[in-house]
Image (cartoon, rainbow, N blue to C red):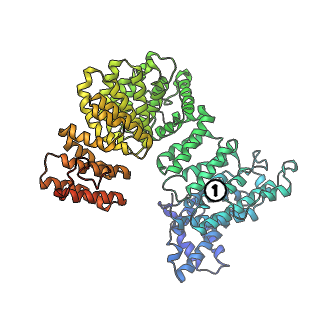
Amino acid sequence: MPGTKAPQRCVLLPEALRHCSQHRDSEAPCFLCNYVKSVLDGKKNSIMYVCFNSVFLLPSQEDMKGPNLTRYFKTLDAMDHMLKLFIKNSPITGFWELQNILQILLPFANSHSEAICERAVGRITKLASWLATSFSPEIHSTSGGAENTGTECNMPVLGQLVGRLLLCHTCKNWQLRWEALDALHYLFRFIQKNRSTAPEDTQEPQEEAEAISWLPSPTTTDVALNFGQHLRPSQRTDVILMVIEALRDSSIYDKQEASSVLDMAIQDPASWLTDVPKIVRCIHGSVECISTAPARQRLDTLILWLTNQWPMKVVRSLLKISPSSDSAALAMWEAMFSHNQTMEKVLRETLDVLQDQQLRRLPGLITDDNCIRHLALLARADVGQEDLDAVYHLQRLLKHPSQAMHSLVLHVLLPVSERPAMARRIPVLLPGIMEGLQAAKADTKLKALLLIGNVMGHVKRKQASSIALQVAGEILPLFNDECSQVQELSICLYNKVMQLVLRCHRRQMKKIVRRGLLPLFFHLSDQTQSVAKASVEALVTAADFLKREELKRLAQTEQTWRIAECLLVQDKRMVEEYLQQSLPYLQHTQVTLREAAVRFIGRAAQHCKDQSARKIHEICSVLQPLQNDEETTVVSLATQTIFILRHPRMQPTSRRCPWALCCWPS
């Protein structure tokens, strides 16, 4: 890689280049050629590496002035002369010498430093120019072998080269972009010239060749399409591998342009996506390095597409790469499981591997602790003892620190939970599922909530009551989740949970239901209508569970602020707890909920047992930050509430008009 140490015998080459840059232009090539032959003969790769490493790592061109800049350009010219000498001095093997040089240049063209990348691409452009103008196809054809048909270019490094230049063409650095485009243009001319040596029956008309040649300002996809029809399958695969790696967070390339090339490949899979094992291996090596949402989404799309088209190849390739499913493999399995149809194909192929005696004897193909093994067993339509054992094995998997593992397990358990026989086996897993629920992603929370609902619908009433008591308290924090779907589903499940509790569990459940009253009250004002509706229904059920008829009537008629008064009057012991529960809503992202919290805290202050100046000061201190809120309605409410709390003698005395009439609607 660029920047590492080179062999000791080659350290004199940079000095030779600098000495060469001081000679007259006509003498420089001769001097360098003699130097190479006499001192460094037989060490070409080391020579080139040290040369590139020394010159490319010089300060950027903008930091050079006067004589230094002149010497810099002369050094680059001397380097270009040296590379040409390497090729010209080998008339028979010069083409392969050229490929060797390009192979050494490629890592430099992938540098995170734009200066290094630009210098490497500059050298590639010079060599591509020679390839397009001076290379003789006849000489090459004598050593090309039977594979050189004339319709494809027998140049193994070409795919990597085209892929790297395509990506350089997406950079923000315009000099690098145009340099890369020039190199691509020369390479395309070389390919067309190579095609012109094909037999007459394989040649295309000149007009067609001109039509596909080049566009004035081609996009990355345009260039890829132009090259694609001339590259070998292995070369096209190399382009795709480069593009996948370009989606990594550390990449300097335009990820949107790289994604467009993947889209193009998906539209023409017969040309671009032929080597599935290689592509799967590349995805496995890159998936954990890609966190930006659009890039990750595009990679997941590619995984899904490959799996749908070639499930056997994808599954067996991934099992071979990661027999025990490491974190990267888990991320890929999770992407495959995001669609039920794809998940079924994957699990079916995994079962085939498990049932194939020859495959099972292959060392390291699928280990006993691989989660996919147990998920596949669970997904079988016929439930046997081995499948039931797999359910218990999942207990260990749910303790895995990876969120992807939790998501995978839930992906498979969710459809399994719809089968009564299996659903009745799942309750043993609920502690593990609930333990990771709060920190999980939104889609994982949704799966868990749906699964709990399915299980409670299939088990006996007494067990359902026990599960209800087990999960009710864990559901409450999800009322305030960032995802409105999670909010709605958690409130709906909470409603169902309260209805399933038997008499033997009612006393314990009452404590949890009382804690849920205020969150449900606040979400009556939720801007998401489905959440507000679910909150009304759950509050009616909660009031019925607690046998509070007045609260139930007010909830049914949605008299929001009379509900607040009812909560504070009917359970004065809860006022302090209500005040604490209200605090998070002061920072809620929804304006309506911040307003509701300010109003409720103002009312709760009236019912607070402690009416000391210190207590009032504490409440006002909590409300003060909202005087700088971005919403004027919240600022006004907070200011008025603080004023009334600090001047209690000025509050209205009418029963019909609450003490903070200016703060709440009548």
Question: At 49% from the left edge and 51% from the top edge, which residue is drawn?
Answer: 292
Query: 379 and 637: which one is in front?
Result: 637
Compared to residue 616, the image places residue 440 above or below, namely above
95 sits left or right of 168 in the view:
right
Question: At 56% from the left edge and 35% from the top edge, which residue is drawn?
Answer: 317
Name the image quarter holding residue 445. top left
Q: Which residue is mark 1?
A: 161
373 sits left or right of 311 in the view:
left
Counting from the top left corner in percent of width and height, residue 511 is at 24, 32
Q: How many numbered tags mark residues here?
A: 1
Compared to residue 319, the image places residue 71 above or below, namely below
Question: At 48% from the left edge and 54% from the top edge, which residue is drawn?
Answer: 249
Counting from the top left corner in percent of width and height, residue 217 is at 69, 64
19 sits left or right of 499 in the view:
right
The residue lying furthest to the left in this view is 612
Query: 325 and 77: which one is in front?
Result: 325
Q: Please, what is the three-letter code of the amino acid marked with disc 1?
A: Leu
The residue lying furthest to the right in this view is 200
Counting from the top left corner in percent of width and height, residue 148 is at 76, 48
Name the image quarter holding residue 189. bottom right
Counting from the top left corner in percent of width and height, residue 615 is at 15, 52
At label 1, counting other C-alpha atoms closer than 10 Å, the crowd grade (few under 14, some 14-19, many 20 or more) is many
Residue 383 in view in this figure? yes
Q: Secondary structure at mark 1?
A: helix
Residue 405 in view in this figure? no
Query: 540 and 585: which one is in front?
Result: 540
Query: 465 and 630: which one is in front?
Result: 630
